[in-house]
Every structure is written in structure tokens, then in C-alpha cells.
Amino acid sequence: MKNTIAERITDFIKLFPPFDHLPHHDLYQLAEEISVVYLDKDESLYNQGKPPKEHFYMVNQGAIRVYRHDGENSIEVEMCDEGDVLGLRPLIVQENYTLNAKAYEETIVYAIPIKIFNDKFENNNKVSKYLITRFASNSVAKFSQADNEKIFADYKRTTQTDYFSSKISLLMNSAIHCDQEATIKQAATIMSENKISSIFVINKERPIGIITNKDLLHKVATGTFGIDQNVKEIMSSPVVCASPNVSIAEGQIIMLKNKIGNVCVTKDGTPQSTLSGILTQQDIVASLSNNPAVLMKQINRARTISRLRELRQQLNQLLQRYINQHFSFTHTLTVVAELNETITEKTVEISLKELGKTPPVKFSFFSMGSQARKEQLVPTDQDNGMIFEDVPDDRLEETRSFFTGFAKIINKNLHAIGYEYCPAEMMASNPTWCLSKREWESQFKDWIFNPNEKNILLSAIFFDFNYVFGDRQLVKDMSTIVHENTKNNPRFFMFMSKDALKSPSPLGFFRQFLVDQDGVHKDQFNIKQRALMPLIDAARILTLQHDLQGINNTAERYYKLRELEPQNAEIYEACAYAFKALLKYKTKNGLMTLGEDDGKFIKLEHLSKSEKVKLRRCFKPIKSIQEVITLRFQPIL
């Protein structure tokens, strides 16, 4: 007689990797050995530092928060929900748990015995490939069958350097260095003898700078500096550092953000402590086959817009692979955002060469909206602007004309790469958004001190901006202007909160989804407008109120608010989780409809009952955060 529970488990796990292409008979035999675990809210599944259990887990219903303790801080790694696998790596490499897992809400998980799993699937090629790609591979192009056989040949060895959990101390090498009193000739001799491309400069065993082959080429070989001068004359400082205890993934993020090829490893992760070693992109590539560093390198080397278009398409493939393989969405979001930003930066650089003229004054090209918040995964339309140094009134229009002409080339090239023109012309090529520093200050003050409906709408768009290319200080000055003029400005916050509340709960009275009533998207659910934007708008207002500068990402804003307002910590954490879950769903939908829209319109008939339940669960924090906004700012609705 059939075991109905095993049948139900089989029907569920066969929908998700690594079980989605395996024979039903084998899955049923495994399902007979699987235990069902019920967890109350905040109940632990496993704990950091503890020996691994005999099972790994798959979430059936609910959500599991995965995080780690770093001193007194709790750092969230991922929120796992339906179909996500967790707790497998410690069983494979036979080490203690490096992370904590706790139920975010009432949750059901399947406990899968590792011994039975190994007995049945250890030699299964498809399972081995999944495990490798899930925890290690970051390839940027599809592999041929021959490539696959090479890359995944040594399953046991490769998983020893797990991308997300292994520490960079596992890969780092000894750092070659010289004393701060050394000459450039002495440093170059050490580099030559050791056949290395960079050398650290130290003072009492602490790194104070770094010299690379590029420094020798551009600063010494050109005659700018003599070989007998002190190394401090040409070194780059301060040094970008990391602790030996951060993961390989975190080490790579540090390199991507700083656009460098190596990171200095010190005892406590700061330049004020002892030099321990060096981690390079090559170390990571060698240990993990392929990863985003390869794509980043190709982007930085690109010389044409057509090449950048090819690389942007490869980035889409990378994103698709990460989503399909259930990579940490937090990590996916960070990696794709950094690569996407570098493509935009490179586009501006190529456009400036295409222009063939030297800008008359300092300028900065900046992004707005989802790209500025580092939330743009599937390409959307362009939102950008230009700020240039103040000039005398008689030169203002001439200078603006130069930069709008430059911006037209940038916008044209971004369009060629795959970023559509903004229908509302919120682009730097529009003279309205190509302004001097003084004009931007006047514009921001007008929006802030005259908060009518149009000005508030523009504030919501333009207050999320991020530097891309040019003089970074100009963009920093813009941010200062915004924060100085919104501080202690209750009237502005009252109007802004009214705008943020214009989209109520996405559910109607009978808990049905509120859909578009007419137009080409009739009867479809707009996940961006009805679910994501209320969370984005609320986070922006609260961030401004707390005068938090330099934090644009919506989830990161909520995590910071959680620290600042412990009394509302549960609400802010729920908002961060809901936002990432909704953005992940929009991204998956956008990848399926690539070329039609960016995934914001969802056809409800394509959703399963389980998917609808998950979406409704993400809507709950919207009501809570809107209640916080209403009570705090008292908008006149």
C-alpha cells in the first residue's frame, strides 16, 4: 500500500533542484525516509558552531532566516522559503555549522537524511552538478558537455572551497612587502625577484599602502618619479583590507565594489592591524572554476558599445543561472548590481572618448531609481542626470549645451546596450535634468519647501541617486543639500508620507489581488506599483528622517532602521524580507518575459495556490509599515 505522506513529499521535492530531474521511484524511496519538522516562530533549526545533524533540510512552507553572529552583530545571509535547501554543506565537508537557521514564522521543513541521500545519489551526475554550481560555480557562460565533465569532475575536492561559507584564509597567500623607508628601486627589485605584480608597503607590520605594476609603468617609467625616491611617493593609500574570517563571497564583493584585483588580509580586517596575507581574484578563479570576476574583468576591458551589449546579455544569463540554482538572493542582488553599475560606468567612459572633447568643467553623471538603489536586476528604462560645476551666468547655457550633447551620446549608447529610453525623459540628455550645482540646489529646495503633488513625485524619483562617473564630490554635495533641507522639516515629511500611502494594501476586502482594470495589462497584478513601491517609499522617508546618508538599497535601509528603532525591529525586519522576496519574484517573472517588460505585471492565472499564499504573506508588512508612517507623520489623506 502506498504511503500517502511519502507521495506528498515526493510530489513536492520533485519540483525543485537537485530532485527535479530524478526518477520518481528513487525520489519516493528517499521520501519514505524523510522526516517532517514543524517549527514555531523563532525556533532554531540549527546553530552556528554546533556539530552537524544527520539531515539537511528543504523548506516546505513558511520561511527560515539564515544568519551568522559576528561579535555582537547578527548578519543576515539569506531568507529561505519554499523549495530552498539548507544545512547541506557541513554534512559534505564534515565541519560544524558556520551559520544559524531560525524559523521566521511558523514553518514546515523536510529533514532529508544525508546517508540515504548519498547512498542513492552520490554518483548521480546531475545531482553532483547541482551541488557544485549551487555552492561554488559562478560561471558567466553556458558550458558545453565537455566543459561540464571537466569542471564537475572532482566533486569532493571542489566543495572544500565553498564560495559562501569558506573563509578567505583558506585561499590567501603570503603577502610580499617592503618597509616604508624603502626606495622605489628596492620595491621593484623585490617584485621582480618574487615574480609578483604588487607589493605592500608596511610600517611596523601594518599595511599603509600598495604599489602595483601599473604604478611603476605610469609613474616611474614615464619619468614622473625617480627610482631612488621613497615608495610612499607612488603607493596607493589607504589599503583595502578584509578580515581572514570573511567568506570568499564577501572577499569578492569587496574587490568588486572597490574595482581592485586583490585585497589585503589583516588580523582584524583594518589597516591598523598586522598584515596576514593577500587574496587575489586569480586565487578565487582558480579555486572555484569560474565566477563574476571574469565578467567584471571583461567589462573593464571592453572598448566598444557592441561588446558591452554582449556582456550585458551574459549578465542576464548569469542572473538566470543564479535564480535557477537557488543562489542566495542577497548575494545575487549585490553581484549583479556591482556588474550592472560597472557597465554603466564603462558606457560613460566610452561615450566621452566618442565625444572627442574635453569637458569644460568638472561634472558627474549619476543614476536614479532602481539602479541607484542597486535593485535593478532585469534591465529597465533609463533614469539618470548630470551635474556640473558652477560657471558664470554668461557661460551657463553654453556649458549646459556641451553636457546635454555628451549625455545624448551616453543615453544612446545605454539604449544600444539594452536600457530603454525613459518615456518621461528623466535622462541627462534632457536639459531639465542637466544642471549646474547651484541649479540643482535651487531645484531640490523648491521641491522640499514647496511640496505640491508634482514636486513630491519628483522628490520620490530624484532623492534616490548614486554616483556613476566623473567628480564624486559633486554627487556627495547633492546628498548634503537634500539632507540639510529635509532635516526638521515636518511639513515636507507630511506631504511625502501622503504620497507614500497612495498605494494601500495590494489585497481587496475579500483578500483578492487588486489588478489593473483596463489597458494592455488588464486583469494583471502590478507587483512593482502595488507591493514594491510602498516598501521603497516608506524606507526612503524613514531614512531621510534619521538623516542616514550613503544607504540607498531598500533592504539595507530597513536593516539600519532595525538597529536605530529596536521597538519597531520586527516590522523593519519583516519589510526587508518581504521586499527581497517580492523583488526576487519580479525578477523571475521578468526573466520569463524578457523583452516584454521588466517583470512587474503578473498574470494571476499562471500562479499556483502556493505562490499566491507566498505573495499574500509578503503583503502583510506593507500594512504595518504604512501604519508606522501614518502615526509618525500624520499625513492629511
Image (cartoon, rainbow, N blue to C red):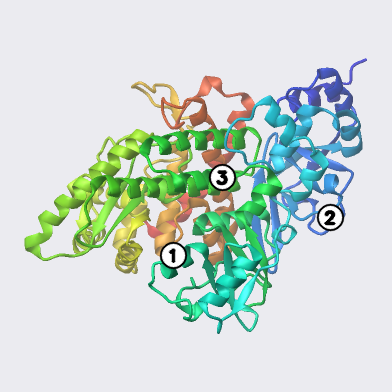
Q: In the image, is 636 to the left or to the right of 267?
A: left
- Which of labels 3 and 1 is toward the front? 3
Mark 2 crowd level (few <14, some 14–19, many ≥20, 10 Å Cα):
some
Q: Quadrant of residue 634?
A: bottom left
Q: In the image, is 145 to the left or to the right of 339?
A: right
Could one spot residue 131 in this view of the protein? yes
Q: Residue at x 51, y 47 (%)?
A: 296
**Which three-letter amino acid code belongs to the residue tagged 2?**
Asn
Which SS class for mark 2?
loop
Dot placed on the residue nearer the N-terminal end, 2 or 1: 2
Dot placed on the residue nearer the N-terminal end, 2 or 3: 2
**Which three-letter amino acid code belongs to the residue tagged 1?**
Leu
- Which of labels 2 and 1 is toward the front? 2
Mark 3 crowd level (few <14, some 14–19, many ≥20, 10 Å Cα):
some
**What whole-number distance in Å separates the C-alpha atoms at marks 2 and 1?**
38 Å
The mark found on residue 391 in the picture is none
Query: Which residue is the site of mark 3?
Result: 294
Q: Residue at x 43, y 43 (%)?
A: 302
**What whole-number distance in Å separates the C-alpha atoms at marks 2 and 3?**
32 Å
- Which of labels 2 and 3 is toward the front? 3
**What whole-number distance in Å separates the C-alpha atoms at marks 3 and 1?**
34 Å
Q: Quadrant of residue 382?
A: top left
Dot placed on the residue nearer the N-terminal end, 3 or 1: 3
Query: Which residue is the site of mark 2?
Result: 96
The mark found on residue 548 in the picture is 1
Q: In the image, is 610 to the left or to the right of 21?
A: left
Q: Residue at x 23, y 49 (%)?
A: 356
Q: Position of residue 444 (x, y in %)?
A: 25, 59
Residue in front for this viewpoint, 306 or 258: 306
